[in-house]
Image (tube, grey):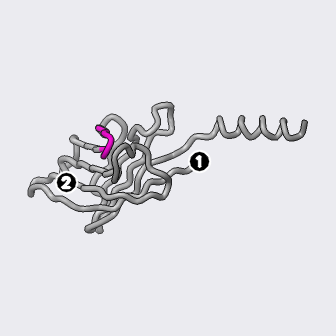
């Protein structure tokens, strides 16, 4: 009986947990943090922050972040930037056919494209997937 009660409590606890997920990316002087929504629309982008060595370049939220996904990559695009950055595109490679879900802590390659008044800059990044429970 005690095992049954413990199992029920464990299942109820797990069903009420929410998981934060996303990516932390870094390379060539840039950092990108991408946080996904913890709501029912899992893996939907909620916040994207781009920074360099001098600080934050852009912070976008919710519907400002467009997501396209295929079997091999996910592309996150921010079109409405600010005076400093006009658009940002982060393409995360899954590294293999049929790999739509990465494990927590798994690192993959990504390409960052930044458009400013001066032109377009490209950077190769390493992105690490994170998953944490609340």
Which disc is residue 133 wearing? 1
Work out whether mark 1 precedes mark 2 in sequence or the reverse, and give the earlier one: 2
The crowding category of the residue bearing disc 2, from other C-alpha atoms within 10 Å (few below 14, some 14 to 19, many at least 20), is some
Which disc is residue 40 wearing? none
Residue matched to label 2: 114
Query: Percent x, y for residue 110?
Result: 29, 56
Query: Percent x, y for residue 20?
Result: 51, 46
Left of 106 or right of it: where is 126?
left
Label 1 or label 2, whichever lies nearer to me, is 1
Find the distance from the CA under tag 1 to the CA under tag 2.
32 Å
Left of 107 or right of it: where is 124?
left
Q: Nearer the viewer, residue 114 or 14?
A: 14
Query: Percent x, y for residue 36?
Result: 43, 43
Q: Quadrant of residue 7?
A: top right
69 is within the stretch colored magenta: yes
Q: Quadrant of residue 24?
A: bottom left
103 to 3, vertically: above or below: below
124 is within the stretch colored magenta: no
Give, as a single range, the part of the protein colored magenta: 68-74
Question: Which residue is rendered at x = 25% and y = 43% of the image?
Answer: 78
Disc 2 is placed on an element classified as strand
Query: Percent x, y for residue 79?
Result: 21, 41
């Amino acid at each position: 009986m005690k095992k049954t009660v413990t199992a029920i409590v464990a299942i109820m606890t797990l069903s009420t947990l929410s998981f934060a997920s996303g990516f932390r990316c870094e390379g060539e002087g840039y950092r990108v943090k991408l946080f996904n929504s913890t709501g029912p629309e899992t893996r939907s982008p909620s916040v994207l922050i781009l920074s360099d060595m001098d600080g934050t370049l852009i912070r976008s939220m919710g519907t400002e972040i467009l997501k396209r996904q295929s079997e091999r990559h996910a592309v996150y695009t921010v079109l409405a930037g600010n005076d400093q950055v006009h658009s940002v595109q982060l393409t995360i490679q899954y590294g293999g056919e049929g790999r739509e879900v990465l494990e927590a802590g798994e690192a993959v390659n990504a390409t960052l494209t930044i458009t400013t008044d001066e032109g377009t800059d490209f950077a190769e990044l390493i992105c690490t997937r994170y998953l944490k429970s609340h």
